């Protein structure tokens, strides 16, 4: 029996975040009334000419630098001919044989063997990244189809991978990594529901050990990252089933229904010559000099995985915390600002409060981080109060909820609500500790035998005697001193 392996390549379209469209000054955006973001250039009225948007070029060069691409010293524009209602010109301005970015790679992480471990990291090589204009959107109804040209002409970046992935999980990790990188770079918001990130997958199978690629099937309408993973897994199973039944695979484009988990054939796959590419006569080639690249390189942020490795090394926080922080650049920046204000040794507490309590409150309120009333300085101050023993954990939760609702400083809330831990008389505390030790011979024996966690058995009665307001740090110190003497 022949064993087969899958070979997967992705074509990822990323809408570039610019104020205006790629070849005209009309605005770009989402959620506007249909056909209001148009002008004579978008609608291809006679006599109109395209003018290049430099902000779109800046963004794609920046993307290329982030992904380690070679930036071409010269790139040109081509017309890709096809006839479809969403393209008012009946061609798309794109790049064919001289794209602006060549090579490069995308670092991905596959799931680790254990929850606390980083997964395997590998780099997926890229073929190219080129710039083109987006097309309009067809809205299909029961008896007709209507076209909205608001999206037409929006700058669109196509990132083409080598056929170097072999599983649906790798493709999922690849797309997630691209999304995070583009958001970090401020290049795109990558909201798939708004069409800002779209993906087509090219999938084939071949016998294990074979070098030649098999018959390629393109899968379209993968409109969520989960659907990319599910659609690829479905298509691999379909191709294996066809071969197992003695059938022959054909090169085609298939539509994937993520809800039903099924696909159907749309058309035979077009080849490059079907589009009759030729250089656009209305647009001059673009020359990219070293000064231009250097300026954009200075604006490039730290990449997500690089930042994750640094946070683990610099702040000594576990992978589980960084894996929540890193996908959101603003959240990871908030962590760093808070950790620096909180001081040495408090980074894990900062990470726990952000990834557990802050994200829970934001999720319940359906608010973004930018709308949070809790400042880095106030969260750091709260953690310092807990660490000093001024505030017990139960009371700290109440203070945090009030901070989230009002934005007040924790010291103000603690004073107003009378939540500070009561000053403990050292003589009284020592008496409570001696009573607790005398009453728990088993825990004493366990602690003496080296079981450090046995100390917790003494703390409950002490906190009960102190009505929950004893300084935990002082309790621990006093207990350890008396246990050493016992």
Image (tube, grey):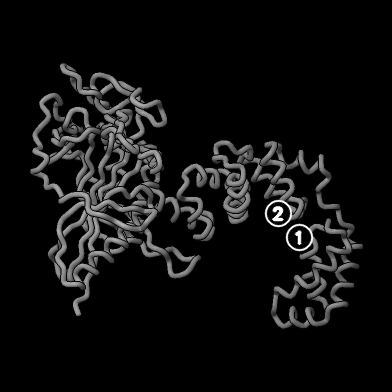
Q: Quadrant for residue 248, please give it.
A: bottom left
Q: Position of residue 59 (x, y in %)?
A: 31, 35
Quarter of the image with the N terminus in it: bottom left
Q: Position of residue 15 (x, y in %)?
A: 32, 37
Query: Which residue does the numbered mark 2 point to in the structure image?
Result: 387
Task: Give the residue displayed 63% in from the left and 40% down from the top.
Answer: 374
- Observer-nearest residue: 267 or 445? 267
In the image, farthest residue toward the top: 47
- Observer-nearest residue: 141 or 280? 141
Badge 2 element: helix
Numbered badge on residue 194? none
Does the rendering let one see residue 433? yes
Query: Which residue does the numbered mark 1 point to in the structure image?
Result: 473
Q: Position of residue 442 (x, y in %)?
A: 79, 82
Q: Position of residue 98 (x, y in %)?
A: 14, 39
The relative height of residue 469 versus residue 55 in the rendered view (above or below) is below
Task: Give the residue displayed 71% in from the left and 38% down from the top.
Answer: 409
Q: Are marks 2 and 1 in contact (CB under 8 Å)?
A: yes
Task: Give the residue displayed 25% in from the left and 24% down from the top.
Answer: 42
Q: Earlier in the sequence, mark 2 or mark 1?
A: 2
Q: Quadrant for residue 456, please give it.
A: bottom right
The relative height of residue 481 versus residue 394 in the rendered view (above or below) is below
Quarter of the image with the C terminus in it: bottom right
Does the rendering let one see residue 108? no
Q: Quadrant for residue 366, please give it.
A: top right
């Amino acid at each position: 029996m022949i064993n087969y392996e899958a070979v997967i390549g992705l074509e990822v379209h990323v809408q570039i975040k610019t104020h205006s469209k790629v070849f005209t000054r009309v605005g770009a955006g989402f959620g506007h009334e249909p056909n209001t973001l148009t002008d004579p250039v978008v609608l291809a009225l006679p006599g109109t000419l395209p003018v290049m948007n430099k902000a779109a070029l800046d963004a794609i060069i920046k993307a290329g630098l982030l992904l380690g691409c070679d930036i071409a010293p010269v790139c040109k524009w081509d017309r890709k001919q096809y006839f479809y209602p969403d393209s008012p010109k009946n061609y798309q301005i794109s790049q064919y044989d001289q794209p602006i970015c060549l090579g490069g790679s995308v670092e991905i992480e596959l799931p680790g063997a254990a929850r606390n471990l980083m997964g395997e990291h590998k780099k997926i090589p890229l073929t190219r990244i080129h710039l083109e204009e987006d097309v309009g959107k067809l809205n299909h109804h029961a008896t007709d189809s209507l076209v909205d040209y608001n999206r037409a002409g929006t700058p669109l970046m196509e990132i083409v991978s080598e056929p170097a992935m072999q599983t649906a999980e790798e493709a999922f990790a690849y797309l997630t990594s691209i999304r995070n990188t583009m958001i970090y770079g401020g290049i795109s918001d990558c909201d798939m529901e708004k069409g800002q990130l779209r993906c087509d997958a090219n999938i084939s199978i071949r016998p294990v050990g074979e070098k030649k690629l098999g018959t390629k099937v393109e899968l379209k309408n993968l409109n969520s990252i989960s659907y990319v993973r599910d659609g690829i897994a479905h298509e691999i199973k379909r191709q294996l089933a066809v071969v197992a039944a003695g059938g022959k695979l054909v090169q085609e484009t298939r539509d994937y229904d993520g809800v039903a988990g099924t696909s159907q054939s749309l058309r035979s796959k077009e080849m490059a010559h079907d589009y009759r590419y030729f250089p656009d006569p209305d647009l001059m080639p673009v020359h990219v000099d070293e000064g231009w690249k250097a300026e954009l390189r200075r604006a490039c942020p730290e990449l997500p995985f690089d930042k994750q490795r640094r946070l683990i090394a610099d702040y000594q926080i576990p992978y589980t915390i960084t894996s929540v922080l890193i996908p959101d650049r603003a959240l990871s920046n908030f962590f760093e600002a808070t950790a620096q204000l909180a001081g040495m040794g408090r980074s894990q507490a900062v990470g726990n409060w952000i990834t557990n309590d802050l994200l829970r409150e934001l999720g319940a309120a359906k608010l973004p981080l930018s709308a949070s009333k809790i400042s880095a300085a106030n969260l750091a101050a709260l953690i310092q109060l807990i660490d000093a023993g001024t505030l017990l954990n139960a009371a700290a939760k109440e203070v945090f909820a009030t901070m989230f609702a009002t934005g007040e400083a924790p010291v103000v809330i603690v004073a107003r609500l009378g939540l500070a831990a009561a000053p403990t008389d050292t003589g009284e505390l020592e008496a409570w500790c001696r009573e607790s030790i005398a009453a728990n011979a088993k825990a004493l024996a366990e602690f003496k035998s080296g079981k450090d966690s046995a100390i917790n058995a003494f703390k409950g009665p002490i906190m009960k005697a102190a009505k929950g307001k004893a300084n935990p740090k002082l309790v621990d110190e006093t207990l350890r001193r008396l246990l050493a003497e016992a």
